[in-house]
């Protein structure tokens, strides 16, 4: 399967909102994605798609914010039907690689303490635990693990090449 990774458009919103709702107990309000695409100058919104019966099927989405020399991953998710197939690694790798190419130096994120799959993925990209936000998530008062990683081009490229996957990376727009 050939995966394409590109900037999110308004036409992607139905699929993005579906992924968000399937992935998180507290999905973003629908108008938040529209704001990030159209109005937030510090936001870069990404999607990953696969060709599906001649049309593109959006399988992943992410919103990152550029703050000085860092990126903050505000949200990132893979559609449940496409998890554990290497797409998350390809998608996150592309986002981090593009940030490194742009001269950004560090990536930051929060992740639920119970989300072991995400924690494992982030650790493969060199993310380390920086701290804990106690009772951060309002739905169940779960702690958030704060993580960050340097955006060294070599580190990102090594992390992507060390993972076996079923897809090929497409070009970003």
Image (cartoon, rainbow, N blue to C red):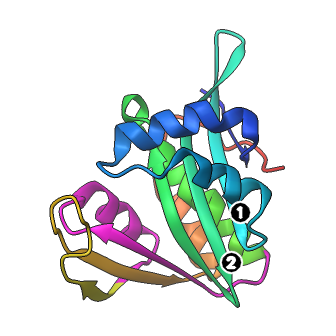
Judged left or right of residue 5, residue 116 is left
Is residue 84 something one can see in this rendering? no
Q: Is residue 85 magenta?
A: no
Quarter holding residue 104: bottom right
- Residue drawn at 18 percent across, 62 percent down: 114
- Residue drawn at 40 percent across, 39 percent down: 21
Helix, strand or loop under label 1: strand
Judged left or right of residue 31, residue 68 is right
Helix, strand or loop under label 2: strand
Judged left or right of residue 171, residue 69 is left
Do labels 1 and 2 touch, CB within 8 Å? Answer: yes
Q: Residues within 10 Å of mark 1 (few under 14, many from 20)?
A: some
Magenta-tinted stretch: 102-128
Q: Is residue 115 magenta?
A: yes
**Residue 162: percent from the left, percent from the top?**
48, 59
- Residue drawn at 59 percent across, 71 percent down: 156
| Vertical placement of residue 58 versus 60, above or below | above
**In the rendering, which numbered label is found on residue 66?**
2
**Residue 60: percent from the left, percent from the top?**
54, 42
Q: Provide the residue designation for mark 1.
A: 44
């Amino acid at each position: 399967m050939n995966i394409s990774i590109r900037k999110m458009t308004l036409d992607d919103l139905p699929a993005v909102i579906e992924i968000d709702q399937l992935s998180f107990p507290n999905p973003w309000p629908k108008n938040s994605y529209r704001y990030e695409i159209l109005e937030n100058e510090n936001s870069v919104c990404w999607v990953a798609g696969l060709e599906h019966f001649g049309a593109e099927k959006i399988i992943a989405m992410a919103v990152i914010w550029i703050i000085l020399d860092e990126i903050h991953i505000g949200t990132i998710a893979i559609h449940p039907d496409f998890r554990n197939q290497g797409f998350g690694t390809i998608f996150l790798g592309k986002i981090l690689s593009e940030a490194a190419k742009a001269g950004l130096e560090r990536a930051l994120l929060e992740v639920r303490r119970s989300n072991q799959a995400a924690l494992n993925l982030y650790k493969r990209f060199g993310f380390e635990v920086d701290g804990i936000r106690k009772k951060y998530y309002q739905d169940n008062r779960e702690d958030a693990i704060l993580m960050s990683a340097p955006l060294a081009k070599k580190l990102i490229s090594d992390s992507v090449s060390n993972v076996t996957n079923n897809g090929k990376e497409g070009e970003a727009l």
